């Protein structure tokens, strides 16, 4: 009987290990004293060091502080197989109080965020800082679940797979809760050198 159970469950364990065994669950360093990159109701500009991209986003909400959020980000160096960043730029501004969808143009990956708070709307406008890498291109993109799960909750979104990168996001804004939910656009990078541009 034990041998029969082993023969039934061993293939299932092998398949599960093959699907989930390569994930590298790790704690990201958000920068020293666990501080935030902004204060409530103030603008901020955060850029990863050259050759690094955003891999984690953390945020906490305060209705008392103008329905605003504190933000923090973690960066990680990209593998050498991606090559060096050939160019970096700021994407167009996504206006406060609106729903929006944006990916980094020209095959770029998100390497920073810039935001300004607007008290008249109780919301922020956003810009992505994007970098294009010389050798590889994004493909097989998907969206995360909503971050945070409900308006007003804390957010702690991390990239668990080493070969996945943030390419953009879509957000919804609640006029009632005066908060945003994000779905980050996550992509893999090709294993071959790209000869095309995806605008």
Image: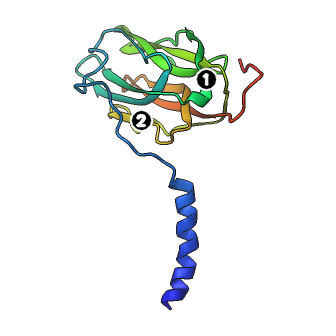
Check the image and report above or below for 141 versus 134. below
Q: Earlier in the sequence, mark 2 or mark 1?
A: 1
| Residue 90 location (% of width, % of height) | 54, 9
Q: Residue at x 47, y 29 (%)?
A: 182
| Residue 187 location (% of width, % of height) | 60, 34
Identify the disc placed on residue 157.
Answer: 2
Check the image and report above or below for 34 versus 66. below
Q: Residue at x 51, y 32 (%)?
A: 183
Report the colour scheme: rainbow
Which residue sits furthest right? 195
Is residue 122 visible to us here?
yes
Residue topped by disc 1: 83
Residue 62 location, quadrant: top left
Q: Kindly report the distance in space between the C-alpha atoms of the residues bearing marks 2 and 1.
A: 26 Å
Is residue 101 visible to us here?
no
- Give the label, 2 or 1, closer to the camera: 1
Check the image and report above or below for 149 versus 20. above
Q: Residue at x 48, y 16 (%)?
A: 50
Describe residue 174's horizontal placement relative to residue 138 as left or right: left
Check the image and report above or below for 28 versus 127. below
Q: Residues within 10 Å of mark 1 (few under 14, many from 20)?
A: some
Describe residue 121's horizontal placement relative to residue 22 as left or right: left
Dot 1: element: loop
Residue 186 location, quadrant: top right
Which residue sits furthest front? 80
| Residue 65 location (% of width, % of height) | 24, 18
Describe residue 175's horizontal placement relative to residue 36 as left or right: right
């Amino acid at each position: 009987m034990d041998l029969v159970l082993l023969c039934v469950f061993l293939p299932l364990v092998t398949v599960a290990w093959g699907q989930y065994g390569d994930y590298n669950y790790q704690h990201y360093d958000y920068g020293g004293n666990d501080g935030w990159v902004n204060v409530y109701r103030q603008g901020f500009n955060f850029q990863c060091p050259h050759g690094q991209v955003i891999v984690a986003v953390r945020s906490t909400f305060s209705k008392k502080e103008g329905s605003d959020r504190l933000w923090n980000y973690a960066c990680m160096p990209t593998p050498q197989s991606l090559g060096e960043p050939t160019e970096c730029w700021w994407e167009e501004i996504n206006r406060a109080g609106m729903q929006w969808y944006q990916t980094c143009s020209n095959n770029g990956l998100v390497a920073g965020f810039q935001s300004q708070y607007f008290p008249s709307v109780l919301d922020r406008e956003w810009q992505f800082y994007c970098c294009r890498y010389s050798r590889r291109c994004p493909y097989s993109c998907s969206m995360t679940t909503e971050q945070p799960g409900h308006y007003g909750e804390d957010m702690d979104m991390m990239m668990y797979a080493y070969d996945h990168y943030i390419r953009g996001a879509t957000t919804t804004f609640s006029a009632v809760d005066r908060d945003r939910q994000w779905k980050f656009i996550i992509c893999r990078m090709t294993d071959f050198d790209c000869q095309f541009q995806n605008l």
